[in-house]
Image: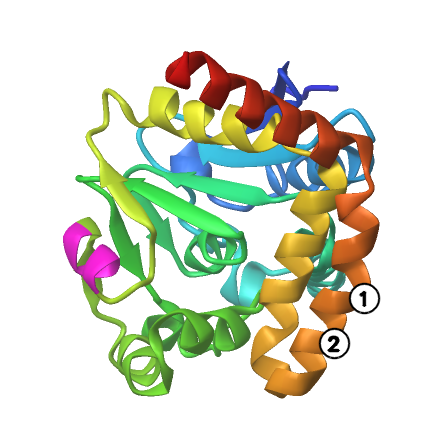
Amino acid sequence: MSDENFKVEMMDGVARCTMSGPTMNAMGKDLLFPLIEGMERVLSDDEVRVVVLRGDGGNFCVGADLSIMGEKMDPVFLYEGMQKMNSIGLAMHDGPKPVITEVDGWAVGGGFSLAISSDLTYATDRSQFLMSFMRISIIPDLGSAYFLPRRIGLARAKELALTARVIGAEEACQIGLINRVFDAESISDEVMKIARRMASSSPRVLAMTKRNLDVSNTLDLKTMLDAEAAVQPYLVMSPEHQRDVQKFLDKQKDVGG
């Protein structure tokens, strides 16, 4: 299930996926298609409950490999790569599995886009984020024009996209671009703790919670309440809910006794 440039480790229902491409995990021919194929597999694998995507070698991903851009770019490779990466971004967002991105070092251009296409993003204190497209006269892609304003608001998104300035992890956390900041030595362990805790939950509940939150900003309150009411009785009758309630009651009894 692993490739030299895209490694997948399965642990307690968590698929930890590591980009290990050359040149700071740039999305060139060595990494792009192993990344696409690896993510397709884990996102469709019923044994996987949570996906963690990270980079090796001290960086997350610096986006496109500029050594093959410009006049050297094969337009067929670019078109096919973008179409397939777009399908992965859509599957990460619309699919039932929670996806966590673990960012260390640089997240640039398409790598920045990939980092924020997940449900949760954690970063090290040495991480740097750069919406670099303006610097090379192209537009933001891989869904960043969709995800960025939804994370940080339209005004801040425009500033980062139009000025192409670098922001560090602390500022990224303050403006809501990422969820939390960890030191580089502990981030992998901390992210896996979070991922394992999520993976221990009911896949149905994970999927339905993720879906309701994703569509909440497109629905009015009544429609959202109706959607919750349509699902909750079904979940209350599930064996997972009954098991968890009994565990809670047993623990209360032990504390009280």
Q: Main secondary structure of the magenta part?
A: helix
| Kind of residue at badge 2 | Asp
Q: Residue at x 54, y 57 (%)?
A: 117
Circle 1 residues within 10 Å: few <14, some 14–19, many ≥20: few
Relative to 6, is 101 above or below?
below
Mark 2 residue crowding within 10 angstroms, few (<14) / some (14–19) / many (20+): few
Is disc 2 placed on a helix, strand or loop?
helix
Check if residue 63 falls in the magenta segment. no
Question: In this view of the protein, can residue 85 be seen by the observer?
Answer: no
Range of magenta residues: 170-174
Vertical order, 79 against 11 (above or below): below
Residue visible at 47% across and 44% down in the picture: 26
> For residue 249, which numbered disc appears in the image?
none
Residue at x 74%, y 52% (from the top left corner): 95
Distance of label 1 from label 2 (alpha carbons): 6 Å
Labelled pair 1, 2 in contact (Cβ < 8 Å)? yes
Color theme of the render: rainbow
Question: Is 135 positioned to the left or the right of 207 in the image?
Answer: left
Q: Quadrant of the C terminus?
A: top left
Q: Is residue 195 left or right of residue 223?
A: left
Is residue 170 among the parts visible in the rendering? Answer: yes
Q: Find disc 2 in the rendering and name its residue.
A: 226
Residue 170: x and y, percent? 16, 52
The quadrant the N terminus occupies is top right
Closer to the camera in the image, 123 or 77:
123
Residue under pointer 1: 230
Count of numbered circles in the view: 2
Say if the magenta span includes residue 173. Answer: yes
**Dot 1 amino acid type:** Ala
Residue 139 point in image, percent of width and height: 48, 78
